[in-house]
Image (spheres, grey):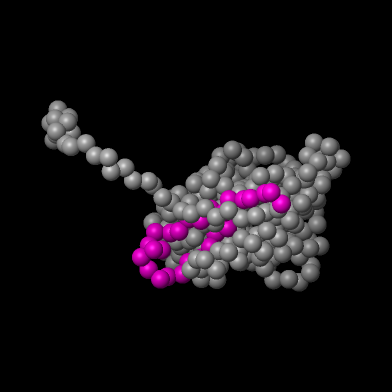
Amino acid sequence: MTASAWTAASAAAPATDDVRPITIGETHMLAYGEGDIREVNVYLPEGYAQTDGRYPVLYLIDGGLSQDFLHVTGTSALNALWGRSKPAIVVGIETKDRRAELIGTPGNAAQRKQFPTAGKSAEFRAFLHDAVKPMIEADYRTNGEDAVMGESLAGLFIAETWLVEPTLFDRYAAIDASLWWDEQSLARSAARSVADGKDRGPIYLTYSNEGPETEQGAELFAAAAGDKACLVPRTDLTHATAYHVLTPQALQFLFPTANTHDPDWGFEVTCSKKS
């Protein structure tokens, strides 16, 4: 059809008021504290409503609608379509005061002065354990397999959770984790923490070109984690670009399929579950 014929056909077509909303999920509002209500956003994978199947769950830190929920759900859907990772329920948990909720120590003197609320990550972890996970497991068809993912301060929180409450999730992905915080105190204490003998699942850990403090923190943490860590240095990326580039690979690591991937896709990692 020529452009002029298409224009004529379009002009002759009847107008329609049949405008339909695009729905990608559901939002629950859960009480975090007195007067503090949080979004918990849930994406259900393609086919969920048409079957009685059960699915793994990805818990996404910084998962508010104005945060990383849309980016990660889109990538999860595309990964599943291509068979790069399993279809998963994505649960995005909103954060507000990220330094309070995602950091476990108050920091050094300068950090305490600049960020006086920092150091209350245990409260956010309790919210996940006591409110978010029970609600998801009660309301949705989960299969008992889960993982957690986040970037920057959320990555620091995930690394800390892997150390202090390792059974909260099965698998972990900490992208560009802010392990520079408090003079790398979490990374420096990691070897001591893992000596407790607790079982810990695999953790995907990356760093970009943020400088020596972040790189050293990631290397220290990975050394302490041993074969449980999948360390992916990407100094060709920046802190601003790493999350979007590495999310497909992180999802492939967290929820691998039996498919063989073309190396040119860049999603396979040598330390993934099936490699």
User: Please, is residue 34 above or below residue 235 in the view?
Assistant: below
Is residue 4 shown left or right of residue 155? left
Return the residue nearer the eye: 223 or 90. 90
Within the magenta stretch, is there residue 121? no
Within the magenta stretch, is there residue 38? yes
Outermost residue to the top: 4
Total numbered circles: 0
Magenta span: 34-60
Return the residue nearer the eye: 120 or 157. 120
- Is any part of residue 151 visible from this angle? yes
User: Please, is residue 145 above or below residue 217 in the view?
Assistant: below
Name the residue at 55% across, 59% down: 58
Return the residue nearer the eye: 114 or 15. 15
- Is any part of residue 205 visible from this angle? no
Is residue 138 shown left or right of residue 53? right
User: Please, is residue 258 above or below residue 219 in the view?
Assistant: below
Question: What percent of the width, then of the height, locates residue 64?
Answer: 57, 47
User: Please, is residue 26 above or below residue 97 in the view?
Assistant: below
Is residue 93 shown left or right of residue 199? left
Question: What percent of the width, then of the height, locates residue 137?
Answer: 56, 67
Name the residue at 73% across, 61% down: 163
Is residue 17 shown left or right of residue 247? left
Question: What percent of the width, then of the height, locates residue 159?
Answer: 69, 56
Query: Which quadrant is the N terminus positioned in?
Result: top left
Question: What percent of the width, then of the height, locates residue 92?
Answer: 56, 53
Outermost residue to the right: 109
Name the residue at 43% across, 54% down: 77
Name the residue at 50% across, 46% down: 71
